[in-house]
Amino acid sequence: MAAARRIGRAEALRLGPRWRHACHALLYAPDPKLLFGRIPLRYAVLMQMRFDGRLGFPGGFVDAQDGSLEDGLNRELLEELGDGAGSFSVTEENYLSSHANEAPRRVVAHFYAKQLTLEELLAVEVGATRAKDHGLEVLGLVRVPLYVLQDGVGGLPAFLENSFIGVAREQLVDALQGLGLLGPEQLQQALAMAQTRH
């Protein structure tokens, strides 16, 4: 299987009709709570358990009738997350990256990140069980643990050992770093621990 290559948005849109475009979004919100009264949660970051047992981000393929990548993404978010996703829109300003992969199919994965309020994110979590695709394409939402427990394994290192679809793990790590959701030292510690345990 060929590795996905990172490309720019404009280049991706010029690839032509033989390519399909999929758009996914990392939804996050500041979370001031403490785990066990002492471990800062920092942010609530959502991912989902997919129908294939892998972790990924909400979203999906853009259809021909969608006016833009973002229109397709917002439609997919409503289908997968329900009415809670109707309180916000992902726009081109939220775009982070694109990855092209020629095998097994020609697909470009576009990735976005949207900051919500904690109340909006909670509404998404609550409403997701009533979404059209819940129990079908989406088996449930999960939050990414943005901490490393005292044993050095629990939290983000253990989470990163899961099976992710496509480039979702890379997208997650890039977003955590690029958006400043986790300090570089903690992120490197989590990555190093996850790598040594594989």
Image (tube, grey):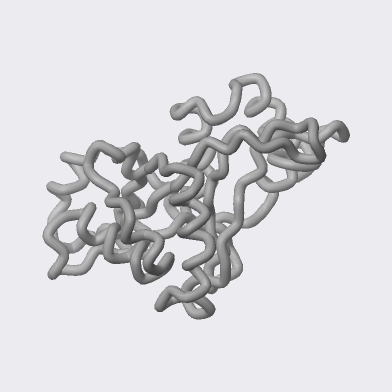
For image coordinates 81% across by 40% down, the residue present is 36
**What count of labels does the image hold?**
0
Between residues 124 and 132, which one lies in front from this camera angle?
124
* Residue that lies at the very extreme toward the front in this rendered image: 119
Between residues 7 and 73, which one lies in front from this camera angle?
73
Tell whether 105 sits left or right of 11: right
Between residues 177 and 9, which one lies in front from this camera angle?
177
Tell whether 159 sits left or right of 2: right
Q: Position of residue 138 (x, y in %)?
A: 50, 71
Q: Position of residue 14 (x, y in %)?
A: 13, 47
For image coordinates 56% across by 58% down, the residue present is 55
For image coordinates 60% across by 22% down, the residue present is 183
Q: Position of residue 94 (x, y in %)?
A: 30, 39
Tell whether 1 sits left or right of 96: right
For image coordinates 33% across by 55% down, the residue present is 87
Q: Quadrant of residue 9?
A: top left
Q: Is residue 165 visible?
A: no
Q: Quadrant of residue 58?
A: bottom left
Image height of 127 relative to 87, above or below: below
Q: Position of residue 1 (x, y in %)?
A: 47, 57
* Residue that lies at the very extreme toward the right in this rendered image: 151
Quarter the C terminus occupies:
top right
Image height of 77 relative to 177, above or below: below
Q: Is residue 157 visible?
A: yes
